[in-house]
Amino acid sequence: MKKLMLLFIIITGLSACSDKLVVENDSLIGDWNLTSIYADPGDGSGKWNDVMITVIQRISFKADGKFEKETIYGFDYVSYQLKDKEKITFKSVNGEEVTMRFTIEGDVLTITPQCIEGCGFRFRKMRR
């Protein structure tokens, strides 16, 4: 009986973890417009710079794991998968995978690729 109770607790705990990732995934799903880019020349003096909004630069996370982009150079990915609440792995059309850190604060998504110098992208969620 104790083993059965332990198994129930473990299964319940695992399903709770799974639900948490689904909720976080739901906040990521949708269309995001690029608003600023972080660049650091390597000396720690980097800063966020607003992008010119003459052309819409958008990324989209779909509920089925598909990823789309519009006019953003370098985001040549077709799908994504959350690794945990801070990391996302993108997959390119040729199967290459790249893992990046991300945060969501309100309607602002920050994606931080692995760079020698500091770099990053900030997006604002589009409302429908």
Image (cartoon, grey):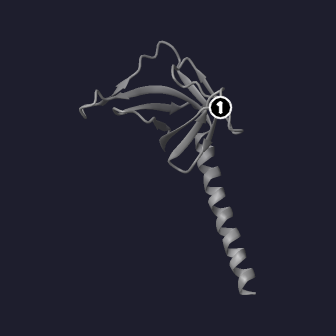
User: Looking at the rendering, which quadrant does residue 118 occupy?
Assistant: top left
Q: What residue is at 62 percent from the left and 60 percent from the top?
A: 17
Q: Decide if residue 71 is in sight here.
A: yes
Q: Say above or below: 8 vs 74.
A: below
Q: Residue 30 at what x, y percent from top left? A: 62, 34
Q: 92 above or below 19? A: above
Helix, strand or loop at label 1? It is loop
Say few, some or many: other residues with alpha carbon within 10 Å of mark 1 (under 14 / 14 to 19 / 20 or more): few
> Residue 114, position in %: x, y?
43, 36
* Residue 84 position (above or below residue 46): below
Check the image and name the residue furthest to the top.
54
Residue 44 drawn at (x, y percent): 25, 35
Q: Is residue 15 left or right of residue 48?
A: right
Q: Mark 1 = which residue?
A: 95
Q: Residue at x 65, y 29 (%)?
A: 78
Could you tell me if residue 105 is visible in this image? no
Which one is nearer the viewer's eye here, 89 or 9?
Answer: 89
Q: Quadrant of residue 5?
A: bottom right
Image location of residue 113, percent across then percent down: 45, 35
Looking at the image, residue 55 lies above or below residue 128: above
Q: In the shown orientation, is residue 84 left or right of residue 114?
A: right
* Residue type at numbered disc 1: Gly
Q: On the image, which quarter does residue 28 sit in?
A: top right
Q: Nearer the viewer, residue 90 or 18?
A: 90
